[in-house]
Amino acid sequence: MTPLLPPDQSAQTLIQALPYIREFSGKTIVVKYGGNAMIDEGLKRAVMTDIVLMRYVGINPILVHGGGPEVSEAMRRMGKEPAFIGGLRVTDEETMEIVEMVLAGKTNKNIVAHLNREGGKAVGLSGKDANLLVAQKDTRRGDIGFVGRITDVDPGIIHTLTAAGYIPVISSVAIGSDGESFNVNADTAAGALAAALGATKLILMTDVEGLYRDFNDKASLLSEMTTGEVDAMIASGAADKGMIPKLEACLDALDGGVERAHIIDGRRPHALLIEVFTDSGIGTMIR
């Protein structure tokens, strides 16, 4: 259990959070949940309590999750060795079945159960539900199977759930025009959903402190960037390859009308509350 603060310090903390509660109450915040925060039990519980608290103070949190390591583990148990091209999983028909079974089944429902245990009312969805995420085959890196590129987002089911007080938990499996399933990068899905929902914030949880001007120099952490600076970083090759899908998701969200995008360190307990309810925030903000 987290040690309790002295009463006067607890009161001061709540008072400092009041302007942010007032600012974001009634607004939508899309959170991409992934990395070590999905594995470490203490971090997992911190994320769940953060999300539930956000809901109780009037914010509409939308949780989009990945689960790549769990998919790879399931593939190996079934005798298939994971393969990646350009950071994307090569997804043949059998692999797509495993992806959907793990992400839309086991991982999604485990997150829902954790949120409900912390006092929330969570509902699990995949992008196939109510045509939430529609995709077509992504051939930009060649034909790597059922890897999808989002072509349309229908957020109607999300609006229905949040209006009724529920927390939507979304796995990044999309539906194609012929009803087939597509594996979609979770960062990309979160960015597209944030834009379609008119979210105030997109928050991507990672296993690094944020975006560095030079990844090998930890003193070069950037607290704030503009979209133009991000474009230049990607074009110059200065952005770490693993960070590029996250940066592209942020740019897509901002181009779609989202006010701010954040890349934060999910290894830090209660990183979401620090980002949303404090003056300093953490990680890198892109505006």
Image: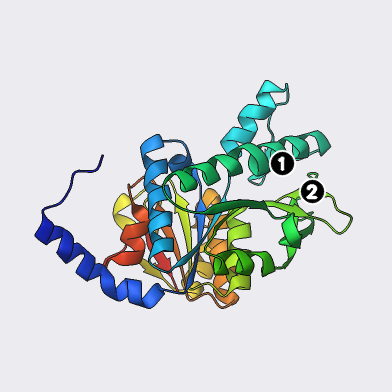
Three-letter code, disc 1: Glu
Residue extending farthest right: 178
Q: Position of residue 126 (x, y in %)?
A: 68, 51
Between 119 and 243, which is closer to the camera in this rendering? 119
Q: Position of residue 187 (x, y in %)?
A: 58, 55
CA gap, disc 2 and disc 1:
8 Å
Residue 181 - label: 2
Residue 277 - label: none
Contact (CB < 8 A) between labels 2 and 1? yes
* Secondary structure under the numbered disc 1 in the rendered image: helix
Taking the spot 10% from the left edge, 53% from the top edge, the residue there is: 6
* Secondary structure under the numbered disc 2 in the rendered image: strand
Q: Identify the image quadrant of residue 162.
A: bottom right
Judge left or right: residue 279 versus residue 237.
Answer: left
- Above or below residue 42? Residue 158 is below
The residue that mark 1 highlights is: 100
Tell which circle, 2 or 1, labels the residue nearer the N-terminal end. 1
Can residue 282 be seen from the camera position used here?
no
Judge left or right: residue 20 versus residue 198.
Answer: left
Three-letter code, disc 2: Ser
Can residue 249 be seen from the camera position used here?
yes
Q: Residues within 10 Å of mark 2 (few under 14, many from 20)?
A: many
Taking the spot 50% from the left edge, 64% from the top edge, the residue there is: 233
- Above or below residue 115? Residue 74 is above
Taking the spot 63% from the left edge, 72% from the top edge, the residue there is: 196
Q: Quadrant of the N terminus?
A: top left
